Image: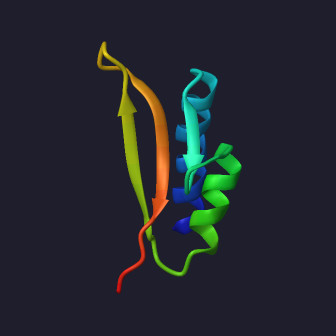
Amino acid sequence: MKVEKYKKMYAELESYENSGICMKLNNHPASPMQIVTAHMVSEEPTYMRDYVWDEKGHVRELAFHNVLES
């Protein structure tokens, strides 16, 4: 069910936010709710995750990029 999928995604992103990890959506700062909402209104899952790591191998930033097929 899609609702459960989005709830799980929101909880995951909220945990990143609570850990101080910066999140972006199409190169703009975004909250977990903004990211989940963008996924919900998209007709197809067209967002690619991009993890940015620090020098110690920890996630520093999580970005979502809209990927359009041509």
Q: Residue furthest top?
A: 56
10 relative to 21, above or below: below
Which residue is drawn at the image coordinates 63% and 24% (left, top)?
A: 18
Residue 18 in the figure: left or right of residue 64: right
Judge from the rendering whether residue 14 lies leftward or rightward of residue 51; answer left or right: right
**Residue 27 percent location from the top left of the image:** 56, 51
Residue 48 x/y as whole percent? 40, 58
Task: Please count the marks in the image.
Answer: 0
Left or right: 15 in relation to 29: left
Q: Residue furthest front?
A: 27
Residue at x 55% of width, y 57% of height: 26
- Closest to the observer: 65 or 46? 65
> Nearest the camera: 25 or 36?
25
Q: Residue at image x 64%, y 73%?
A: 41
Which residue appears at 38% of the width and 46% of the height? 50
Q: Is residue 69 above or below residue 39?
A: below
Can you say which quadrant of the picture contains the C terminus?
bottom left
Q: How is the image coloured?
A: rainbow
Relative height, residue 60 to residue 68 (above, below): above
The residue furthest bottom is 70
- Residue 8 at x, y percent in the picture: 54, 48
